[in-house]
Image (cartoon, helix red, strand yellow):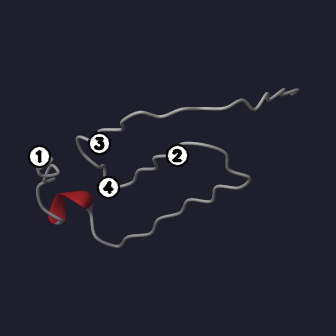
Amino acid sequence: MNLQVVNKDIHIGVIRVIGVASSSLLLVGDACNINLSAMADTPPEAVGPIVPLPPPR
């Protein structure tokens, strides 16, 4: 596979995060390496309800 990347300037005004999943990543900009891993011995249904983030002040 051939991949060509052209880096240019980015300008981010506002980022609103409404909620966060149990496994999530928010990336703005460059990254050389991203390694994500997770391990849990509790089933997701035993953790409880997912609570949204509070509204911004």
In the rendered image, the vertical position of residue 4 relative to residue 21, given as above or below: above
Mark 2 or 1, nearer chain start? 2
Q: Quadrant of residue 2?
A: top right
Q: Residues within 10 Å of mark 1 (few under 14, many from 20)?
A: few
How far apart are the alpha carbons under marks 4 and 1? 19 Å
Q: Earlier in the sequence, mark 4 or mark 3?
A: 3
Residue 21, x across and y down, in percent: 31, 49
Mark 4 surroundings within 10 Å by alpha-carbon count, few (fewer than 14), some (14 through 19), many (20 or more): few
Work out whether residue 10 or residue 17 is closer to the camera in this orientation and state it.
10
Q: Which mark is residue 22?
A: 4
Query: CA separation, marks 3 and 2?
Result: 12 Å
Amino acid type at circle 3 is: Val
Secondary structure beneath disc 3? loop
Q: Which residue is mark 2?
A: 27
| Mark 2 to mark 4 CA distance (whole Å) | 16 Å
Q: Which disc number belongs to residue 55? A: 1
Circle 1: element type: loop
Nearest the viewer among 57 and 5 is 57
Residue 26 marker: none
- Name which of mark 2 and mark 4 comes first in the sequence: 4
Tell me the quarter of the picture where residue 3 sits.
top right
**Separation (CA) of disc 4 from disc 3:** 14 Å
Whole-angstrom CA distance, mark 1 to mark 3, is 10 Å
